Image (tube, grey):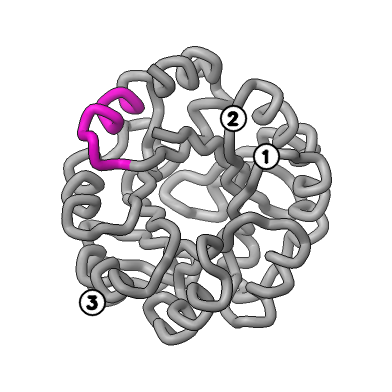
Amino acid sequence: MILYPAIDLKDGQAVRLVHGEMDSATVFSDDPAAQARSFQDAGCEWVHLVDLNGAFAGAPVNGAAVEAILAALDVPAQLGGGIRDMATIEGWLSKGLARVILGTVAVEDPDLVRAAARAFPGQVAVGIDARKGMVATKGWAEETDVTATDLARRFEDAGVAAIIYTDIDRDGAMGGPNVEATDALARAVDIPVIASGGVSSLGDLQRLKAQGTIAGAISGRALYDGAIDLGAALAALRD
């Protein structure tokens, strides 16, 4: 199981939110590129990026910070937030991003997701963010009547590289991930599923890995707060 350290970008800084609320932001770094490099130097195989402003604006906002991160990294990075048209997808991938994460458009324009997955094999993931099992979009500001499982199944044959599943009620709250819901989603589809939201201890990572169904886990606040020792976590997931 791959550990994806998260860098959430707001106004050019690395922050973490609680339950996706922008006014709950805690700044962890004024130099996101240096933070990304430190994750790589610690042995991380990937870095997970989110353009928080972009998720609300519907277009990239923290582009300069993302480009600085990409310039600092040798390992691949994936990015979500505000990526809602083919031109933006093409633009990011041409700048060296390994994978784009499509969230809102997965609900509103699933044909775009399918077209992008065909055009860029292995480089398009679907972000499914759910509150009590129901998908939320536009930076989690709008709720839908679509279940996470139903949305995932719509892309079963689309060739997407992964599904990033976030339980919004767990995100940033340090209360542990929704292992049961993530495992159920992973069993419902053949697409690799990456867990996100509430991963706050080595035990959380071990429980996710023990399911045998989950391809990766994203953690942010716990790594910054020191609740998860990055070296110990990487070693445990390699075993």
Compared with residue 202, is residue 159 higher up or lower down, i.e. above or below?
below
The amino acid beneath tag 2 is: Cys
Verify CB contact (< 8 Å) between mark 1 and mark 2: yes
Alpha carbon distance from label 3 to label 2: 36 Å
Residue 168 appears in the picture as rendered: no
Q: Which of 205 and 159 is in front in this view?
A: 159
The amino acid beneath tag 1 is: Val
Give the quadrant of the C terminus: top left
Q: Earlier in the sequence, mark 3 or mark 2?
A: 2
Q: Quadrant of residue 178?
A: top left
Residue 25 is situated, as x and y percent measured from the top left of the image, at 59, 45
Q: Quadrant of residue 156?
A: bottom left
Residue at 40% across, 82% down:
110
- Circle 2 — which element? loop
Give the dominant element type of the magenta stretch: helix, strand or loop. Answer: helix
The amino acid beneath tag 3 is: Asp
Residue 29 is situated, as x and y percent measured from the top left of the image, at 73, 35
Verify CB contact (< 8 Å) between mark 3 and mark 1: no
Alpha carbon distance from label 1 to label 2: 8 Å
Q: How many marks?
A: 3
Q: In this view, does 19 lie to the left or right of 221?
A: left
